[in-house]
Each structure stands twice: as C-alpha cells, then as structure tokens.
Image (cartoon, rainbow, N blue to C red):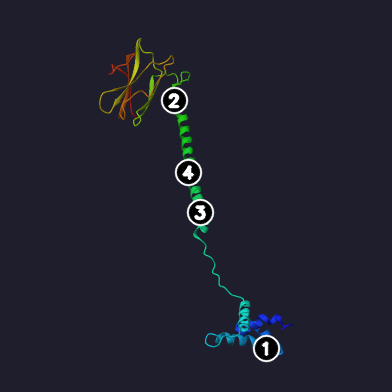
Amino acid sequence: MSGHEQFADDLALLALGTLEGDERQVLEKHLQECAACRRELESLRGDMALMALSTAGPKPPARSRERLMAAMAKEPRRETVSPPRRPWWVLAPSLLAVVFLLLVILLMRRNSALTQRIAAMDYDAAAQQVELRRAHEIVSTLTANDAMRVTLVAAKTPPQPQGKAIYVRDRSSLIFIASNMPAPPPQKAYELWLIPASGAPIPAGVFKPDAHGSAAVVNPPLPAGVELKAFAITIEPEAGSTTPTMPIVMVGAGE
C-alpha cells in the first residue's frame, strides 16, 4: 500500500458502498491500473462479509473486525443540525422599538394639535385685549376732565342743551353725555331717568355740568334687562330722588 495511501480512506468507503461522485470515478480508474489496491479492496470486502456472518456463523478473525471498524471510523459522519429556535425575548427589543416609535408619532401629532390650539387661543386673547383697550380709550375720552367738548350748531344760533344716551339692554350698560347744560339752582342737580316700556321711571344717575355745561353718566346701577321706552331729565336735590320731580326739562325716546 506504500505509494497508494492516498486511496486508503476511499477504498474503505467503496467497500462500505458509500463512496460517490468524482472520488468514486477516480478510484475505480485507479483500481484498473493498480493490483495492490484491488487486493486491498477485496480484503476489505472479505472483512465485511465475515462481520455480516458473525451473528449466525463462527466468530470472524479479530484482525478483520479491527480493519473494518477502523475503516468505518474514518468515514465522515453527516449530522443534520436544526437551526436553534430564537426565544421570544430576543424579539423584545425590536417590538419595544416599534412601540416607542408609534408613541413618538402619536405624541408629535398631539403636540402639533395643542400648539395650534394654543396659537388660536393666543390670537383670540390678543384680539380681546385690543378690543378692551379700545373700550378703555373710549370711556377715558368720554369721561376725561380735560377733554374739549365742542357742539356744532347753525351759525348765529345759540347752543341748545342736549344729551346723548347709549344704552345696552342685555348688559344693563349706559353712557350718557350732556352738553350746553345750564347750571342747576343751588343745592340742586340734574337726575337722569330711564323710562321703561312698562312700570315706574328708574333713577339712572345724578350729575352737575361743569363750567362749559358738559356732564357725563357712565354705567350707573340699573336693573337687568329693562326694555327702554325713553330717557328723561329732571331737577332734583343733590342726593337725587326715587321718583321724578316735575317738570321734565329734557326727554328723548329710543331710536
């Protein structure tokens, strides 16, 4: 077998009937030219036959058994290894990442909606602040002591006493402005009256004109929701009266 050791393993596999493919073809071609390898193959096959008969016949020689076992030991074993199953907790990080991403998207959408709502509320608040400032400016102008009050009349016509009342029923809000009013008698004052559609006149404020004949009554205490018929002015004691004292010096119906 010296010089032919490269075929020793293949001879054992061929004797067992497990040699296939190109290696079998190469060995069979070699056997056609090599008598030593043919004898070795026959010896291996004989050992196998003796091993097969050992269960029913005489015990085969120990050398034959050892040769065959050695040849079988050299045969490579093929094992099928199933891929290990991945435990469920291996996927936990991926699942957590997906859940976290969904939560982030949801929070971003909610944050965007809240931002828009806050912006709308800020805009409404700013608009209300503007309206409130305008209202304050109007009231401040109407009630300013140093304001110049000018009444335009026809040429060469003496200015006539007059009053302008602005009444909001739903808010019980009233602003009254008088101009060109003569001074009342001593210890007397003018009193404004709200004449309702039904019922007795309601006191709406006491006032005295300044040196220019101007005066104003702003938001006196009034009952809520009174339907207006007219306003009237009488001359009363400085503290005011609960009922009008005749005569009525000025009167005006609602427009």
Question: Which is closer to the viewer, label 1 or label 2?
Answer: 1
Residue 139's disc is 2
Give the mark nearer the N terminus: 1 vs 4: 1
Residue 233: name its quadrant. Answer: top left
Is residue 62 rendered to the left or right of residue 145? right
Query: From the viewer's perspective, is residue 25 above or below residue 216?
Result: below
Query: From the viewer's perspective, is residue 115 above or below residue 47?
Result: above
Q: Nearer the viewer, residue 38 or 191?
A: 38
CA gap, disc 1 to disc 3? 69 Å
Give the mark nearer the N terminus: 1 vs 2: 1
The residue under the point 61% across, 79% down is 69
Kind of residue at disc 4: Leu
CA gap, disc 1 to disc 4? 94 Å
Kind of residue at disc 2: Val
Q: Secondary structure at mark 1?
A: helix
Q: Quadrant of the N terminus?
A: bottom right
Residue 219: name its quadrant. Answer: top left
CA gap, disc 2 to disc 3? 63 Å
Q: Secondary structure at mark 3?
A: helix
Kind of residue at disc 3: Leu
Is residue 132 rendered to the left or right of residue 2? left
CA gap, disc 1 to disc 2? 130 Å
Residue 116's disc is none
Where does the image place residue 73, in percent across and percent down from the top left?
A: 61, 77
Q: Quadrant of the C terminus?
A: top left
Residue assigned mark 1:
39
Kind of residue at disc 1: Arg
